[in-house]
Image (spheres, rainbow, N blue to C red):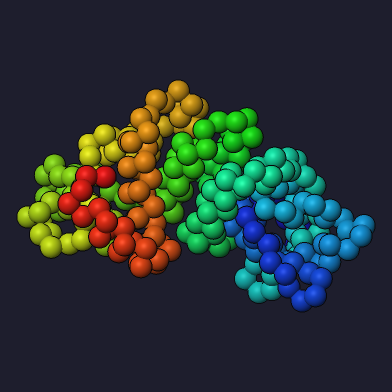
Amino acid sequence: MQKRTESIVISNRQFNEADLIVTLLTKDHGLIDVFAKSPRKVGSRFGSSLEPLTYSKVAFIGKQQSHLPRLIQSDIIKPFSKLREEFNLFMALSEALELTKKILPQGVPQRGPFQLLLNMLISLEEGKDLKKQIIYYKIKLLKFAGFAPGLERCIRCSSPTNRFSLSEGTLLCSKCSPSSEHLIIENSIKNLYNFMLRIRPSVLDRLKITEDTLKGLERVINSHINYNIIDNKLNTHQFIASTRGVRV
Ligand SMILES: [Zn+2]
Protein backbone atom coordinates (compact mmCIF):
# COMPACT_ATOMS: atom_id res chain seq x y z
CA MET A 1 0.00 0.00 0.00
CA GLN A 2 1.28 3.42 -0.93
CA LYS A 3 1.59 6.04 1.79
CA ARG A 4 2.10 9.75 1.29
CA THR A 5 3.26 12.23 3.88
CA GLU A 6 5.68 15.07 4.52
CA SER A 7 9.06 14.38 6.03
CA ILE A 8 12.42 15.79 7.10
CA VAL A 9 15.58 13.76 6.46
CA ILE A 10 17.33 12.91 9.74
CA SER A 11 20.19 10.85 8.30
CA ASN A 12 21.13 8.52 5.49
CA ARG A 13 23.55 5.62 5.22
CA GLN A 14 24.83 3.60 2.33
CA PHE A 15 23.29 0.21 1.68
CA ASN A 16 24.74 -2.22 -0.87
CA GLU A 17 26.73 -0.36 -3.52
CA ALA A 18 24.42 2.30 -4.75
CA ASP A 19 21.42 2.33 -2.44
CA LEU A 20 20.61 4.25 0.72
CA ILE A 21 18.69 3.67 3.93
CA VAL A 22 17.21 6.99 4.90
CA THR A 23 15.83 7.89 8.33
CA LEU A 24 12.90 10.27 8.04
CA LEU A 25 10.91 12.14 10.64
CA THR A 26 7.46 12.15 9.08
CA LYS A 27 4.33 14.13 9.76
CA ASP A 28 2.02 11.11 9.93
CA HIS A 29 4.11 8.03 10.78
CA GLY A 30 6.71 9.30 13.23
CA LEU A 31 10.32 8.26 12.75
CA ILE A 32 10.83 5.67 9.99
CA ASP A 33 13.62 4.09 7.95
CA VAL A 34 13.03 3.78 4.20
CA PHE A 35 15.00 2.16 1.42
CA ALA A 36 15.97 4.33 -1.56
CA LYS A 37 17.11 2.59 -4.76
CA SER A 38 20.16 4.10 -6.50
CA PRO A 39 19.54 7.70 -5.42
CA ARG A 40 22.94 8.85 -6.66
CA LYS A 41 22.52 7.67 -10.23
CA VAL A 42 22.38 10.41 -12.82
CA GLY A 43 18.74 11.15 -13.48
CA SER A 44 17.57 9.59 -10.20
CA ARG A 45 14.13 10.81 -9.27
CA PHE A 46 15.36 11.65 -5.79
CA GLY A 47 17.93 14.27 -6.83
CA SER A 48 19.34 15.96 -3.71
CA SER A 49 16.20 15.37 -1.67
CA LEU A 50 17.80 12.76 0.61
CA GLU A 51 20.35 15.13 2.16
CA PRO A 52 19.92 15.61 5.94
CA LEU A 53 17.49 18.42 6.90
CA THR A 54 15.65 18.35 3.54
CA TYR A 55 11.91 18.87 3.92
CA SER A 56 9.95 16.98 1.24
CA LYS A 57 6.70 15.43 0.18
CA VAL A 58 7.35 11.70 0.07
CA ALA A 59 5.62 8.51 -0.97
CA PHE A 60 6.67 5.00 0.02
CA ILE A 61 5.34 1.47 -0.26
CA GLY A 62 5.56 -1.60 1.94
CA LYS A 63 4.97 -2.52 5.52
CA GLN A 64 7.28 -1.15 8.16
CA GLN A 65 7.15 -4.35 10.21
CA SER A 66 8.57 -6.76 7.61
CA HIS A 67 10.94 -5.25 5.04
CA LEU A 68 11.95 -1.65 4.91
CA PRO A 69 9.36 0.49 3.14
CA ARG A 70 10.63 1.56 -0.26
CA LEU A 71 10.77 5.24 -1.10
CA ILE A 72 9.19 5.89 -4.50
CA GLN A 73 8.90 9.66 -4.53
CA SER A 74 10.51 12.62 -2.81
CA ASP A 75 9.72 16.16 -3.90
CA ILE A 76 11.52 18.95 -2.09
CA ILE A 77 9.36 21.54 -0.33
CA LYS A 78 12.31 23.32 1.34
CA PRO A 79 15.94 22.16 0.99
CA PHE A 80 17.27 24.10 4.04
CA SER A 81 20.60 23.99 2.22
CA LYS A 82 21.76 27.21 3.92
CA LEU A 83 21.72 25.36 7.26
CA ARG A 84 24.14 22.74 5.92
CA GLU A 85 26.64 25.32 4.71
CA GLU A 86 27.63 26.93 8.00
CA PHE A 87 29.85 24.67 10.09
CA ASN A 88 28.75 25.61 13.64
CA LEU A 89 25.12 25.59 12.67
CA PHE A 90 25.34 22.22 11.00
CA MET A 91 27.30 20.67 13.90
CA ALA A 92 24.68 21.82 16.41
CA LEU A 93 21.90 20.56 14.16
CA SER A 94 23.65 17.21 13.60
CA GLU A 95 23.74 16.67 17.36
CA ALA A 96 20.04 17.53 17.59
CA LEU A 97 19.23 15.12 14.74
CA GLU A 98 21.26 12.35 16.40
CA LEU A 99 19.33 12.85 19.63
CA THR A 100 16.06 12.76 17.67
CA LYS A 101 17.01 9.43 16.11
CA LYS A 102 18.07 7.94 19.44
CA ILE A 103 15.19 9.10 21.55
CA LEU A 104 12.09 8.68 19.39
CA PRO A 105 10.57 5.22 18.88
CA GLN A 106 10.39 3.96 15.28
CA GLY A 107 7.04 4.03 13.51
CA VAL A 108 4.97 5.58 16.29
CA PRO A 109 2.75 8.30 14.80
CA GLN A 110 3.28 11.55 16.68
CA ARG A 111 3.00 14.93 15.01
CA GLY A 112 4.65 17.03 17.73
CA PRO A 113 8.31 16.17 17.01
CA PHE A 114 7.91 16.73 13.26
CA GLN A 115 6.35 20.16 13.78
CA LEU A 116 8.97 21.01 16.41
CA LEU A 117 11.84 20.20 14.05
CA LEU A 118 10.24 22.02 11.12
CA ASN A 119 9.67 25.14 13.26
CA MET A 120 13.30 25.12 14.40
CA LEU A 121 14.66 24.78 10.85
CA ILE A 122 12.45 27.63 9.60
CA SER A 123 13.51 29.83 12.54
CA LEU A 124 17.19 29.11 12.00
CA GLU A 125 16.94 29.85 8.30
CA GLU A 126 15.40 33.18 9.26
CA GLY A 127 18.53 33.84 11.33
CA LYS A 128 17.08 33.34 14.83
CA ASP A 129 19.39 32.64 17.79
CA LEU A 130 20.97 29.18 17.44
CA LYS A 131 21.56 28.39 21.13
CA LYS A 132 18.05 29.37 22.18
CA GLN A 133 16.52 27.35 19.34
CA ILE A 134 18.60 24.24 20.05
CA ILE A 135 18.00 24.15 23.82
CA TYR A 136 14.27 24.69 23.29
CA TYR A 137 14.24 21.86 20.73
CA LYS A 138 16.04 19.47 23.07
CA ILE A 139 13.75 20.24 26.01
CA LYS A 140 10.57 19.78 23.97
CA LEU A 141 11.91 16.64 22.31
CA LEU A 142 12.74 15.14 25.72
CA LYS A 143 9.17 15.91 26.76
CA PHE A 144 7.65 14.24 23.67
CA ALA A 145 9.80 11.17 24.27
CA GLY A 146 8.95 11.00 27.99
CA PHE A 147 12.50 11.79 29.14
CA ALA A 148 12.08 15.39 30.32
CA PRO A 149 13.86 15.91 33.65
CA GLY A 150 11.70 17.03 36.58
CA LEU A 151 12.90 20.40 37.87
CA GLU A 152 10.03 21.54 40.09
CA ARG A 153 10.42 20.06 43.58
CA CYS A 154 11.81 16.95 45.25
CA ILE A 155 10.06 14.08 43.46
CA ARG A 156 9.63 12.07 46.70
CA CYS A 157 8.64 14.55 49.41
CA SER A 158 7.73 17.67 47.37
CA SER A 159 9.99 19.91 49.41
CA PRO A 160 11.79 22.73 47.56
CA THR A 161 15.31 21.74 46.55
CA ASN A 162 18.01 22.60 44.04
CA ARG A 163 19.68 19.17 44.02
CA PHE A 164 19.34 17.45 40.65
CA SER A 165 20.09 13.72 40.65
CA LEU A 166 21.59 12.68 37.32
CA SER A 167 20.79 9.00 37.75
CA GLU A 168 17.14 9.71 38.64
CA GLY A 169 16.76 12.56 36.14
CA THR A 170 14.88 14.65 38.70
CA LEU A 171 15.21 16.86 41.76
CA LEU A 172 15.82 14.94 45.00
CA CYS A 173 16.39 16.67 48.35
CA SER A 174 19.26 15.72 50.69
CA LYS A 175 16.91 13.87 53.07
CA CYS A 176 15.41 11.67 50.34
CA SER A 177 18.68 10.90 48.59
CA PRO A 178 21.67 11.96 50.65
CA SER A 179 24.40 10.33 48.59
CA SER A 180 23.31 10.51 44.97
CA GLU A 181 25.50 12.19 42.37
CA HIS A 182 23.92 15.54 41.86
CA LEU A 183 24.20 19.01 40.43
CA ILE A 184 23.07 22.13 42.23
CA ILE A 185 20.75 24.06 39.95
CA GLU A 186 20.03 27.72 40.51
CA ASN A 187 16.42 28.89 40.65
CA SER A 188 16.83 31.00 37.51
CA ILE A 189 17.75 27.86 35.55
CA LYS A 190 14.83 25.86 37.00
CA ASN A 191 12.45 28.70 36.15
CA LEU A 192 13.73 29.05 32.60
CA TYR A 193 13.45 25.31 32.03
CA ASN A 194 9.89 25.08 33.38
CA PHE A 195 8.89 28.12 31.32
CA MET A 196 10.40 26.68 28.11
CA LEU A 197 8.51 23.42 28.66
CA ARG A 198 5.23 25.33 28.47
CA ILE A 199 5.72 27.97 25.77
CA ARG A 200 5.14 27.96 22.04
CA PRO A 201 8.07 28.68 19.69
CA SER A 202 6.71 32.17 18.92
CA VAL A 203 7.10 33.15 22.59
CA LEU A 204 10.72 32.01 22.46
CA ASP A 205 11.65 34.89 20.13
CA ARG A 206 10.59 37.49 22.70
CA LEU A 207 12.23 35.71 25.62
CA LYS A 208 15.20 37.55 27.13
CA ILE A 209 17.73 35.15 28.67
CA THR A 210 21.06 36.02 30.26
CA GLU A 211 24.10 34.24 28.86
CA ASP A 212 24.86 32.60 32.25
CA THR A 213 21.36 31.20 32.69
CA LEU A 214 21.31 29.82 29.16
CA LYS A 215 24.74 28.22 29.64
CA GLY A 216 23.62 26.72 32.96
CA LEU A 217 20.51 25.26 31.37
CA GLU A 218 22.56 23.82 28.49
CA ARG A 219 24.88 22.08 30.96
CA VAL A 220 21.99 20.54 32.90
CA ILE A 221 20.16 19.34 29.79
CA ASN A 222 23.30 18.03 28.07
CA SER A 223 24.39 16.22 31.25
CA HIS A 224 20.97 14.62 31.55
CA ILE A 225 21.06 13.56 27.89
CA ASN A 226 24.60 12.18 28.13
CA TYR A 227 23.97 10.33 31.37
CA ASN A 228 20.58 8.86 30.57
CA ILE A 229 20.31 8.68 26.79
CA ILE A 230 23.66 8.78 25.03
CA ASP A 231 25.26 6.77 27.86
CA ASN A 232 28.43 8.76 27.54
CA LYS A 233 29.25 8.36 31.21
CA LEU A 234 32.92 9.21 30.92
CA ASN A 235 32.20 12.78 29.86
CA THR A 236 29.41 13.06 32.37
CA HIS A 237 31.67 12.00 35.22
CA GLN A 238 34.29 14.49 34.12
CA PHE A 239 31.60 17.13 34.14
CA ILE A 240 30.42 16.21 37.63
CA ALA A 241 33.96 16.20 38.95
CA SER A 242 34.57 19.64 37.55
CA THR A 243 31.36 21.15 38.91
CA ARG A 244 30.76 19.33 42.20
CA GLY A 245 30.05 21.86 44.88
CA VAL A 246 30.00 24.61 42.28
CA ARG A 247 26.76 26.23 41.27
CA VAL A 248 25.96 25.74 37.61
ZN1 LIG B 1 12.73 14.93 49.41
Q: Seen in the image, is 67 located left or right of residue 175?
A: right
| Front residue of this view, candidates 60 and 42 | 42
Residue 172 is situated, as x and y percent measured from the top left of the image, at 17, 53
Q: Residue at x 69, y 45 (%)?
A: 85
Quadrant position of the C terminus in the picture: top left
Asked whether residue 93 appears in the rendered view, the answer is no
The quarter of the image holding the N terminus is bottom right
- Is 149 rendered above or below residue 42? above
Q: Residue furthest front?
A: 242
Q: Position of residue 77 (x, y in %)?
A: 75, 40
- Image: 123 above or below 93: above
Q: Looking at the image, which is closer to me, 31 or 133? A: 133
Relative to 14, 93 lies left or right: left
Front one among 215 and 11? 215
Residue that lies at the very extreme toward the bottom in this rendered image: 16
Q: Quadrant of residue 106?
A: bottom right
On the question of residue 107 being in view, the answer is yes
Give the answer, above or below, for where 86 lies relative to 164.
above
